[in-house]
C-alpha cells in the first residue's frame, strides 16, 4: 500500500487525559468515512465499523488500550470474484510505555510481549482501529461453494500434461508386477 495519509484519525494526547481513571471511547465512522476506509484497505465495501474500548493509565506515564473491533466487510471472492460478506469481532490490546528500552544491537530477539510500544505524544485511536481492521481481514475470502478447479495450461496444439505424466515411475510397479506374474 502506498504511503497515503490514513483515511480516519482520532488523536488523543495522553497528557490531556485523566491520569487516574479510564477514558472510554466509541468510534463509529459515518458512511463517507467507511467508503474511504474501504478504498484505502482495498476492499469492496465496509457496511459496519465500530471500535469501542477504554484507554487506561498504568503507573505514572504508561497507557493500556483494551477495545473490540466490530465490522462487516465485503471483499471479492478469490475464485469467482463474487462479493463475500464477513463479520469481524476482534479484541484489540495495546500498551504504550514511557520508558520502553530500545534494542541496542542491529539484530535483537523479539520480546515475548509484542503489545508494548513506545509512548508517543499523540495516541491515534483511528490508526489503531485501521491496523486492527487490516489484520482481521480474511486473506482469501471465498463465496459459498467456490472451489478451485484443476488448471490445464499448454501451448496450442499440445495435450495438457496430467498428474500421471508428472510421475514417470508411477506405472513402473504395474509393469514389474505384470512381468513377474506367470502368463495365463
Image (cartoon, rainbow, N blue to C red):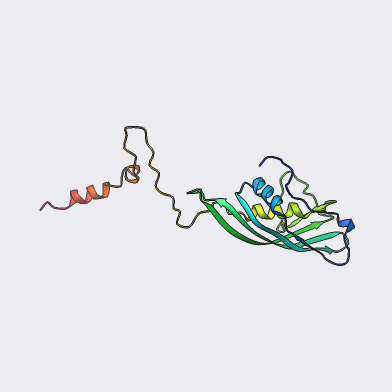
In the rendered image, the vertical position of residue 87 relative to residue 167, given as above or below? below
Residue 155 x %, y %? 37, 33
Residue 47 x %, y %? 64, 56
Q: Which quadrant would residue 128 be assigned to in this image? A: bottom right
Residue extending farthest to the left is: 184
> Would residue 26 appear left or right of 89 to someone viewing this image?
right
> Would residue 87 appear left or right of 32 to someone viewing this image?
left
In the rendered image, the vertical position of residue 154 relative to residue 175, given as above or below? above
Q: Nearer the viewer, residue 52 or 46?
A: 46
Which residue is pictured at 68% across the width and 40% down the height? Answer: 2
Q: Nearer the viewer, residue 108 or 58?
A: 58
Residue extending farthest to the front is: 31
In the rendered image, the vertical position of residue 59 relative to residue 78, given as above or below? below
Count of number-bearing discs: 0
Which residue is pictured at 83% across the width and 52% down the height? Answer: 122
Which residue is pictured at 32% across the width and 42% down the height? Answer: 165
Which residue is pictured at 37% across the width and 36% down the height? Answer: 154
Q: Quadrant of the N terminus?
A: top right
Q: Is residue 110 visible?
A: no
Residue 59 x %, y %? 86, 64
Q: Nearer the viewer, residue 109 or 133?
A: 133
Q: Is residue 133 visible?
A: yes
Q: Which quadrant would residue 23 be assigned to in this image? A: bottom right
> Would residue 99 appear left or right of 3 to someone viewing this image?
right
Residue 95 x %, y %? 77, 59
> Would residue 68 appear left or right of 123 to someone viewing this image?
left
Amino acid at each position: 500500500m502506498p504511503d497515503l495519509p490514513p483515511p480516519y484519525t482520532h488523536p488523543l494526547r495522553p497528557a490531556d487525559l485523566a491520569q487516574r481513571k479510564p477514558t472510554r471511547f466509541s468510534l463509529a465512522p459515518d458512511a463517507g468515512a467507511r467508503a474511504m476506509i474501504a478504498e484505502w484497505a482495498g476492499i469492496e465495501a465496509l457496511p459496519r465499523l465500530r471500535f469501542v474500548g477504554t484507554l487506561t493509565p498504568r503507573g505514572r506515564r504508561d497507557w493500556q488500550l483494551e477495545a473490540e473491533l466490530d465490522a462487516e466487510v465485503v471483499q471479492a471472492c478469490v475464485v469467482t470474484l463474487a462479493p463475500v460478506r464477513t463479520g469481524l469481532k476482534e479484541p484489540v490490546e495495546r500498551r504504550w510505555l514511557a520508558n520502553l528500552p530500545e534494542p541496542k544491537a542491529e539484530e535483537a530477539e523479539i520480546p515475548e510481549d509484542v503489545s508494548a510500544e513506545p509512548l508517543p505524544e499523540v495516541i491515534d485511536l483511528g490508526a489503531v482501529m485501521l491496523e486492527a481492521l487490516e489484520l482481521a481481514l480474511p486473506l482469501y475470502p471465498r463465496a459459498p461453494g467456490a472451489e478451485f478447479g484443476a488448471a490445464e495450461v499448454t501451448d496450442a496444439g499440445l495435450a495438457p500434461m496430467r498428474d500421471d505424466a508428472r510421475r514417470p515411475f508411477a506405472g513402473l510397479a504395474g509393469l514389474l508386477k505384470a512381468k513377474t506374474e506367470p502368463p495365463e
